[in-house]
Image (cartoon, helix red, strand yellow):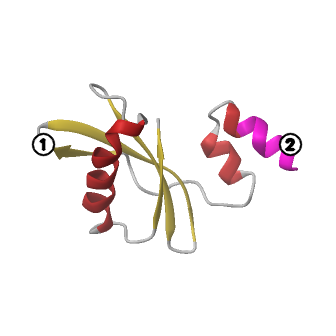
Amino acid sequence: MTAILRDQLKAFKFSQAFQDRNWNPPTRQPFIRNIHDREITCTTIAEQGGWSVLEITANDIDITAPCERGWREMVDKSITDQIHQHILITG
C-alpha cells in the first residue's frame, strides 16, 4: 500500500491518492484568489471530516520554489477565512 501511495504522489496523482484512501471527491468548484495582482487557482481535490485538500497553482510564478515561501503563506492565509481546515499542495 505504501508503494502505491508513493507511486501516485511521484506521478502527481494527488486526487487519486487521497480518494484511494477513502477521502471524498470534492464538492467545491475551483476558485481563484487574487493576491497582489496575481491569480492563484485553488482546486479542491479531496475532502474528509471537515478537511479539504487543495492544489494551488499560479501561472506566472513557480509557487513551489523555496524562495516563494511568502506567496505560499499569503495563499494559506487567504484561504483560511473560507476553509479553516485545509492541506495545500502546490504545483
Q: Which residue is mark 2?
A: 3
State which tag comes first along the sequence, 2 or 1: 2
Query: Tag 2: residue type?
Result: Ala
Query: Tag 1: residue type?
Result: His
Report the front residue among 3 and 47: 3
Given the current orientation, which residue lies at the most extreme top position? 60
Q: How many marks?
A: 2
Answer above or below: position of 2 versus 76: above
Given the current orientation, which residue lies at the most extreme front position? 67
In magenta segment, residue 32: no
Question: x%, y% of residue 54?
Answer: 46, 51
Q: Residue at x 72, y 61 (%)?
A: 22
Q: Quadrant of residue 46?
A: bottom right
Q: Which residues are magenta?
A: 1-8
Answer above or below: position of 28 versus 65: below
Q: Residue at x 12, y 42 (%)?
A: 36
Given the current orientation, which residue lies at the most extreme bottom position? 49
Question: x%, y% of residue 90?
Answer: 45, 41
Q: Is residue 24 left or right of residue 78?
A: right
Q: Which residue is mark 1?
A: 36
Mark 2: few/some/many CA within 10 Å (<14, 14-19, 20+) = few
Q: Is residue 78 left or right of residue 27?
A: left
Q: Residue at x 26, y 69 (%)?
A: 81
